[in-house]
Image (tube, coloured by chain):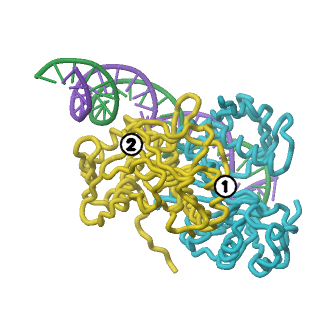
Chain colours: A cyan, B yellow, C purple, D green
Amino acid sequence: MTQVAPSVTVDCSDCPIRHRAVCARCEPEELVNLEEIKYYRTYQSGSRIIWAGDRMDFVGSVVSGIATLTQTMEDGRTQMVGLLLPSDFVGRPGRNGAEYDVTATTDVTMCCFRKKPFETLMERTPHIAHRLLEMTLDELDAAREWMLLLGRKTAREKIASFLSIIARRDASLNLRPTKGALVFDLPLTREAMADYLGLTLETVSRQISALRKDGVIELEGKRHVTVPDFDRLLEEAGDDNDGGMLA
Amino acid sequence: MTQVAPSVTVDCSDCPIRHRAVCARCEPEELVNLEEIKYYRTYQSGSRIIWAGDRMDFVGSVVSGIATLTQTMEDGRTQMVGLLLPSDFVGRPGRNGAEYDVTATTDVTMCCFRKKPFETLMERTPHIAHRLLEMTLDELDAAREWMLLLGRKTAREKIASFLSIIARRDASLNLRPTKGALVFDLPLTREAMADYLGLTLETVSRQISALRKDGVIELEGKRHVTVPDFDRLLEEAGDDNDGGMLA
DNA sequence: AATTTCGTTTGATCTGGGTCAAATACCGTT
DNA sequence: AACGGTATTTGACCCAGATCAAACGAAATT
């Protein structure tokens, strides 16, 4: 893994992952001097990137590492409402208060843009607004799929769904062709998984053990997972895996 | 309630509720001949407006009535993932397949725009893309709040949350000042509420009865609700009702 | 090597909400 | 007023997952 050194002189060509929202190479040179509004920032694993209620003076996207979006009730119950992987966007243009806690679950590098200049940039380049709209609609779809999971799936189905999502994202990020068994590392602790799935950590642990015993997954250590048969996993997840629709 | 007759010659000034996404009065006349791409359509209570998987040839917004967005698993478990009230937008620009079922729960009038012209219109008028982005971000926030409800709230809290949301929306739609007791009609059957809240209809019924017995709400018939003390309801919902954040 | 820490697993028990079933209220029709 | 269909309520029972508790394992610290 190459590491991105904080710098103010880079443009997107230096990023290991090209930003989906904005890219200097996508925009006419004269419109923006990116160096003036763009900077990198790194966060240690476990540290809070944004507190809910904080004033947000920047937007940005994850370059490396994994962060989570969580919501907390007064009595301490917490629900994860989003998982931020490399290339995911953080922050809401046009609003200056953060709605959720953002926490780094691994070391995280963010590529940030100061908010005010970013907003004027967005106004002058419709392409960015369009891209942002598309990304937001994708997130909305993901959130709605998650609502089905939270409201209607059993604990076993929840775990299987989570594993399939991580497997898929991992495969697409690493550009590994989906041949044979899928292998990946769980990016979250059992507790974080529980917060994501609306379960307790004990139930998460038990269901993972059950899936292992039933041969749906193999475990090496606590985090390293092998999925011998992805279709089997999808079946356990209760997902539609057909794309068949009539004319 | 005045009814909107299907017509192709109206513009936004005829709409009982001004479209939040597009409005002829907001756009330069020369850019668009709205009559060519805009039309009204009415749906009977209980009828399906859009089937998941269908080709979508239009986008639009709800003018009157209430519709729901639902997701269904193969075995019939369903989860509502959105509630569409007047002025809410339906359809995703840039994608031609519907993701969810849309069902009218009352008689519904939609104001529709043919998709292709709408997309070119959107490209030529950045204002629309911005407005749409803002609306989508609002929906995403709502979806995330709903994830907390689905994942972590008790049945009683779910019901109280639902009632508070309906009460709030009803009050803002009807521009009733929030003085004293709130009075409104439930727009959904117990079963639809259950699908929304990730519960069974029996549990919904029981919890409503419990809230009535405890004096949190009053019921007249099955649908007509009075909330004597809104703060009490919010308390039952487990929501933060303080806006206090330190400097 | 012993010890603390943190994440995880496993066991025993409890309970909120699901399931199944029956009764009741509320329509719009005839 | 009687009827038939649908929405809702209420009751009895059960189970998936929560809760409480203890043990385990691997990495970091002494």
Q: Would residue B236 be found to the left or right of residue A70 on screen?
A: left
Circle 2 chain? B
Q: Would residue B31 be found to the left or right of residue A9 on screen?
A: left
Q: Is residue C29 above or below residue A222?
A: above
Q: Residues within 10 Å of mark 2 (few under 14, many from 20)?
A: some
Q: In this view, does B57 lie above or below B12?
A: above
- Given residues A9 and A228, the one toward you in this image is A9
Residue A189 horizontal/vertical position (percent): 68, 51
Which residue position holds label 1? A83
Residue A101 horizontal/vertical position (percent): 59, 64
Residue A23 horizontal/vertical position (percent): 79, 67
Task: Give the distance between the C-alpha atoms of the residues marked 2 and 1, in whole angstroms.
Answer: 38 Å
Q: Which mark is residue B101?
A: none
Figure quadrant of residue C17: top left
Kind of residue indicated by mark 2:
Asp
Instruction: Write the residue at 43% across / 53% down.
Output: B63
Residue A191 visible? The answer is no
Kind of residue indicated by mark 1:
Leu
Q: Would residue B138 be found to the left or right of residue A137 on screen?
A: left
Residue A27 horizontal/vertical position (percent): 79, 70
Residue B201 visible? The answer is yes
Which residue position holds label 2? B107
Figure quadrant of residue A232: top right
Element under disc 1? strand
Element under disc 2? loop
- Given residues B164 and B69, the one toward you in this image is B69
Q: Would residue B156 be found to the left or right of residue A122 on screen?
A: left
Circle 1 chain? A
Instruction: Write the residue at 52% across / 50% down.
Output: B112
Instruction: Write the residue at 64% across / 48% down.
Output: A193
